[in-house]
Amino acid sequence: PEVINGRTHKATVVDLSPWVEYEFRVVASNSVGIGEPSRPSALLKTKAAVPVVAPTNISGGGGSRSELVITWEPVSEELQNGEGFGYIVMFRPLGSTTWTKAVVASVESSKYIYRNESITPLSPFEVKVGVYNNEGEGTLSSISIIYSGEDEPQMAPAGASALSVSAAAVEVSWLPIPWNRHTGRVLGYEVRCW
């Protein structure tokens, strides 16, 4: 901090964070050096303000059919700037002009799940997450693209064939299911025999 003239007995401290408790000490100095600090002042909390830091690491995806799962990194307490802190989640199908808005009132929340039977599997959505507190709405994150949940594969593998390789083993082969919006990502296959 800047040095204050010896005849001055008060100062304004600036650039403090909103809604944070501070205590202050004063130190006297002269040409010989710096003296002992005063005892700490009583704790004083700065006034609340609209939050200015948006959540980070906006991602999501997965979930069940007809779900859009949105996740984010929660904002730390010292950046919430006031009471009544929560999150604003905004999303729209890619190419749409209308945003859907949801409010998540829990400070600890880091996930929102939107369920709607009209959502088709693996549909891309534009998503942004913002913050608010009792003072008003704050900053929104930049837009992220998140895909809705997948459905189970709607087609069976084709070209299944079996070849006997020994008295106790059979080699089974098939053509893989090609990826598309309706099949989703095939994570594995199950071979059944009877």
Image (tube, helix red, strand yellow):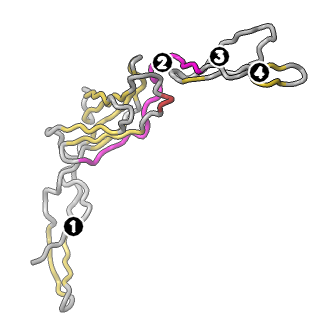
In the picture, the disc for residue 163 is none
The residue under label 2 is which amino acid type? Ala
User: Residue 6 at x, y = what percent?
Assistant: 81, 11
Provide the residue designation for mark 1.
189
- Sort mark 3 into few (<14), some (14-19) or many (20+) by Cα contacts within 10 Å: few
Question: Under tag 2, what secondary structure?
Answer: loop
Provide the residue designation for mark 2.
48
Q: Earlier in the sequence, mark 4 or mark 1?
A: 4
- Marks 3/1: CA distance? 65 Å
Magenta-colored span: 43-63
Q: Quadrant of residue 1?
A: top right
Provide the residue designation for mark 4.
27
User: Residue 60 at x, y = what percent?
Assistant: 33, 43
Residue 44 within the magenta-colored segment of the rendering: yes
Q: Earlier in the sequence, mark 3 or mark 1?
A: 3
Question: Under tag 4, what secondary structure?
Answer: strand
Provide the residue designation for mark 3.
13
Question: Under tag 1, what secondary structure?
Answer: loop
The answer to whether the residues at label 4 and label 3 have Cβ atoms under 8 Å apart is: no
- Residue at the image position 42 percent from the left and 36 percent from the top: 74
- Side (left or right) of 9 relative to 132: right
State whether residue 7 is above or below residue 98. above
The residue under label 1 is which amino acid type? Tyr
Q: Nearer the viewer, residue 26 or 144?
A: 26
- Marks 4/2: CA distance? 29 Å
